[in-house]
Image (tube, grey):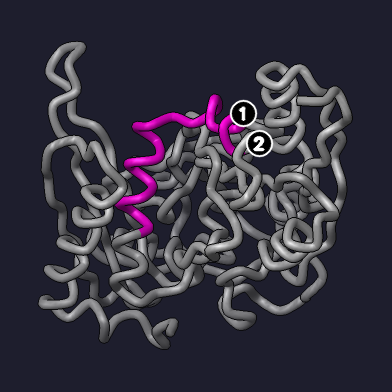
Amino acid sequence: MTDKALRLGTRRSRLAMAQSGQVADAVSQVTGRPVELVEITTYGDTSREHLAQIGGTGVFVTALRDALLRGEVDFAVHSLKDLPTEQPEELALAAVPVREDPRDVIVARDALKFTDLPRGARIGTGSPRRTAQLNAYARGHGLDIETVPIRGNVDTRIGYVREGELDAVVLAAAGLSRLGRIDDVTDFLSVDTVLPAPGQGALAIECAADNADLIAALGELDDPFTRAAVTAERSLLAALEAGCSAPVGALADLLADGQIVKEMRLRGIVGTTDGSRTVQLSTTGPVPETYDQAMALGRELAAEMLAQGAAGLMGERAH
């Protein structure tokens, strides 16, 4: 390997720059080469439409992948939940590092918890998945909330609360942690209340499929348990034929007996955005040792969810 700088393609947002900077440091350590960040603007960054309207799938990814394919960058870092479930043959998912906390969190006025919000509280989120589950939980527990669609970066979203326009916003714990802003959180939402997006909290490091040396070097950062979990979650999403803006939550976690990891549990939920109907199921199996086993776990749960009517709850399905 030469000591020439590696070029890392990243979105320009503060969060993307923060997480790419952390990956750059790690890649420098394993390769002994400097890493420079190459900022790339994606369609999802410039469009003012709500993500559910512009399709969600791939809007933050396509420009980065195009730069990789043109050879303008050597590798790219994505939030894994933004990746379409179909992996292009020309690109390799070289590493999925250890996952951050996958949960969603509330940032609310007056340091309120979710269940302490006043009647009629306005909660901002740009995610149909969060909207569906918050409304379903509220219906089931006698809470009176209004979900309000919002866009923008973390500062913008938290600003709506600080300025009194909203009572609370829902964000990903991982993003706030990577920005050093976890202290803004007023409540961590249990995964029993809101299941995260498939792959939430995980990063994806991608490079050209024909660059064996770089794939091997980046592979040092791969965490097999995280990769197995997100593969199962994304397999569920793909088998439901749902894009990453669909109201689908999924989480695979490891069930341990003391220090020994015994099994992997995969939970999935699909719901109408008003919260009136949901299909929520789980399955448990041996910890997947191969990509195919992790995929099978996701497909199996998706088949059960579809048999219980999940397709009818998702609105438009991605093809």
| Quadrant position of the N terminus in the picture | top right
Which residue, given by chain and number where applicable, does mark 2 sit on? 214
- The stretch of residues the image draws in magenta is 215-234
Residue 166 or residue 76, whichever sits in front: 76
For label 2, count other residues whose C-alpha is less than 10 Å away and answer few (under 14), some (14-19) or many (20+).
Answer: some
| Quadrant position of the C terminus in the picture | bottom left
**Above or below, 255 relative to 82:** above
- Percent x, y of residue 193: 31, 49
Residue 12 or residue 180, whichever sits in front: 12
Q: Is residue 123 magenta?
A: no
At a point 30% along the width and 59% down the height, the residue shown is: 137
Number of marks in picture: 2
Residue 272 or residue 288, whichever sits in front: 288
Q: Is residue 216 magenta?
A: yes
In the image, is 109 to the left or to the right of 265?
right
Amino acid on which disc 2 is placed? Leu
The image quadrant of residue 51 is: bottom right
Q: Is residue 270 visible?
A: yes
In the image, is 91 to the left or to the right of 157?
left
**Above or below, 143 relative to 37:** below
Which residue, given by chain and number where applicable, does mark 1 sit on? 217
At a point 47% along the width and 50% down the height, the residue shown is: 117
Amino acid on which disc 1 is placed? Ala
At a point 43% along the width and 55% down the height, the residue shown is: 197
